[in-house]
């Protein structure tokens, strides 16, 4: 069970933006300060841009390319991963151009007798 006590955000600036990347797991960004122009390329290849700022929470689905270009004062982001599926990369930044695949998460329903 992930439990984050006193999480520390990462600081990004116009000189050090969050480059376009993807993950094999869902990822949630908590924006603790600042502002940026965020972008994503969804699973169908559709590009979208929008503003993220202090107080926002952005949940990015596995396989969605994403990143952001911070405003002049920068932005602080606390990112945390969702469930890391079996067979996935270790958490980190991966690039569609290099990896050449689109991850898909699948739910496996295992019967149980816990509540009979």
Image (spheres, rainbow, N blue to C red):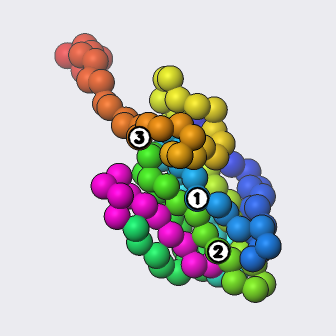
Q: Of the residues under marks 3 and 2, which one precedes in the sequence?
A: 2
Residue toward you, 31 or 12: 12
Q: Which residue is mark 3?
A: 102
**Quadrant of res 8:** bottom right
What residue is at 35 percent from the left and 58 percent from the top? Answer: 45
Q: Is residue 48 left or right of residue 11?
A: left
Stretch of the chain drawn in magenta:
36-46
Which residue carries the number 2 mark? Answer: 69
Q: Say whether residue 54 is visible.
A: no
In space, the residues marked 1 and 3 are separated at their CA atoms by: 14 Å
Q: Secondary structure at mark 1?
A: strand
- The residue drawn where x is 67% and y is 63% is 18
94 to 44, vertically: above or below: above
**Residue 20: assigned label:** 1
Which structural element holds mark 3?
loop
Taking the spot 69% from the left edge, 83% from the top edge, the residue there is 71
Where, by quadrant of the figure, is residue 38 drawn? Answer: bottom right
In the rendered view of the protein, which quadrant contains the C terminus?
top left
What residue sits 41% from the left and 72% below the top? 48
Query: Where does the image place residue 27, in percent across and percent down from the top left?
Result: 53, 51
**x and y, in percent, of residue 43 in the image:** 35, 52
């Amino acid at each position: 069970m992930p439990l984050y006590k006193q999480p520390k955000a990462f600081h990004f600036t116009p000189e050090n933006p969050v480059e376009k990347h993807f993950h094999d797991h869902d990822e949630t960004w908590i924006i603790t300060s600042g502002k940026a122009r965020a972008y994503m390329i969804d699973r169908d290849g559709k590009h979208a841009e929008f503003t993220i700022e202090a107080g926002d929470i952005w949940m990015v689905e596995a396989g969605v390319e994403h990143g952001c270009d911070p405003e002049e004062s920068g932005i602080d982001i606390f990112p945390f991963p969702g469930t890391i599926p079996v067979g996935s990369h270790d958490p980190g930044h991966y690039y569609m151009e290099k990896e050449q695949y689109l991850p898909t998460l699948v739910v496996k329903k295992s019967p149980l007798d816990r509540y009979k």
